[in-house]
Amino acid sequence: MKKTIVFACLFTAFVIGCKTNIGDAKKLNIVFEPKSNSAVSGTATFVEQNGKVTFVATLAGLKPGIHAIHIHEKSDCSAADGSSAGGHWNPTFKNHGKWGVGDYHKGDIGNFTADENGNGTITLTTDEWCIGCGDATKDILGKGLIVHQGADDFTTQPSGNAGARVACSAIIK
C-alpha cells in the first residue's frame, strides 16, 4: 500500500509538472512572456539541491545570434518593454561584469546563442543563489528574469549594453 501511494505521487508530479520538494531539492518552473513587440517564448527551471541551484532556460522566437539573460530586481513584467522588472539584481553592490570573473552582479547570468531557427538554451549551476531561503544576498524569489535583444559586453555599467528586453518572467512560486 505504501509503495503504491509513493508511486502515485511521483507519477502525478511527473505528469503534471509543478514546484516540488524531494528530499532537500526545490524546483521552480517559470514561463517567459514576450516584451518589446518580440515573439520570444520559453521556460526556465531552477532546481536547488545540496546547496547549489541549477538554472536552465530554453527560449524560442529569438533573432539568431548572441543574447544576454539576467536576473532583475523585481518580479514585475507588466511594462510592455519589461522595464518594470527594474535593473539587474545586485544585492552585494558589485560592478556589472562576467559571471565568475572579477566583479559581477548576482543577476549577471551571461550570454547564450540562438541558432538559425531562433532557439537557444543556457545552463548555470551556482552556490550563490537559493530558492526561498530568505537570505537577501542569495534568494532569487521575487526577482525577474529578463532576456535581452543583444549580447552583454560585460563592461558597460550598470547593465552590459545588451539592448531591448525581449522576454520577461517573474521568479515566483
Image (spheres, rainbow, N blue to C red):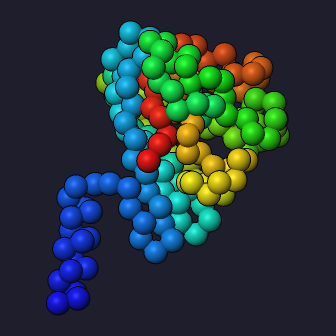
Q: Kindly identify the residue that appears in the image at 26 percent across and 63 percent down.
A: 13
Farthest residue, direction top: 37
Q: Nearer the viewer, residue 39 or 152?
A: 39
Does residue 54 sit above or below 30 in this rendering? below
Q: Kindly identify the residue that appears in the image at 33 percent across and 17 percent down.
A: 39
Farthest residue, direction bottom: 1
Does residue 150 sit above or below 51 in this rendering? above
Q: Kindly identify the residue that appears in the image at 66 percent across and 57 percent down.
A: 127
Q: Is residue 130 left or right of residue 42?
A: right
Residue 141: x, y in percent?
55, 45
Q: Is residue 38 left or right of residue 144?
A: left
Corner quadrant of residue 84: top right
Q: Kindly identify the residue that appears in the image at 70 percent across and 53 percent down.
A: 135
Residue 8: x, y in percent?
19, 74
Corner quadrant of residue 103: top right
Confirm whether residue 14 shows in the render: yes
Does residue 145 sit above or below 66 in this rendering? below
Residue 67: x, y in percent?
52, 24
Confirm whether residue 45 shows in the render: no
Q: Quadrant of the N terminus?
A: bottom left
Count all numbered tags in the image, as a single digit: 0
